[in-house]
Image: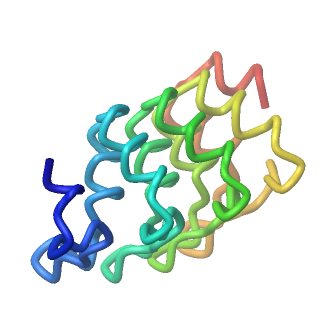
Amino acid sequence: MLLERENINPDYIDPELFDQTPLAVAAENGHEGVVKMLLERKDVNPDHADTFYGQTPLSLAAESGHEGVVKMLLEREDVNPDHADTDSSRTPLAFAAAKGHQGVVEMLLESADVNPDQPDTFYGRTPLLWAAVNGNEGVVKIL
């Protein structure tokens, strides 16, 4: 109902949430229905990075292991699947690998635009090293 109103900004940037948008919050929390509704709108930027860590909705969904949301975002041409955050230059693949989200890792690796060996700038760790450090055997095997 809210999205039907003319005075609602569906791409509102919340300064209290480090400039996250409704899409970012929904993606991070795995709310697939909300993500789908927001992605159907032309006035929503699906690749907006927050100002605290520089994470995009894809990065947040990948870190949280929300495969359905990751799939929806990867289907978009206007989403960079290899966007590195501004805090440590970790990519969605690095976040998913560190948390052991095998399904997300597999989806990201299907994209030719994803560099599977991209080290971050804070620790210098690649997705494989993140998976190994955290004991994520399944992800290590995939990588």
Quarter-of-image position of residue 18? bottom left
| Image: 101 above or below 114 | above
Q: Is residue 11 left or right of residue 48?
A: left
Quarter-of-image position of residue 25? bottom left
The residue that appears at 10% across and 77% down in the rendered structure is 16
| Image: 17 above or below 71 | below
Quarter-of-image position of residue 123? bottom right
Between 84 and 72, which is closer to the camera in this rendering?
72
Locate the C terminus and report the quarter of the image it occupies.
Answer: top right
Between 54 and 134, which is closer to the camera in this rendering?
54
Q: In this view, does 140 lie to the left or right of 85?
A: right
**x, y percent for residue 116:** 80, 48
**x, y percent for residue 72:** 56, 38
* Colour logic: rainbow
Q: In this view, does 90 lie to the left or right of 8?
A: right
The residue that appears at 49% across and 27% down in the rendered structure is 68
The residue that appears at 73% across and 58% down in the rendered structure is 77
The residue that appears at 44% across and 77% down in the rendered structure is 87
Q: Which residue lies furthest to the right in this view?
A: 112
| Count of residue discs | 0
Q: Is residue 116 left or right of residue 3?
A: right
**x, y percent for residue 85:** 52, 71
Q: Residue furthest left?
A: 16
**x, y percent for residue 119:** 71, 63
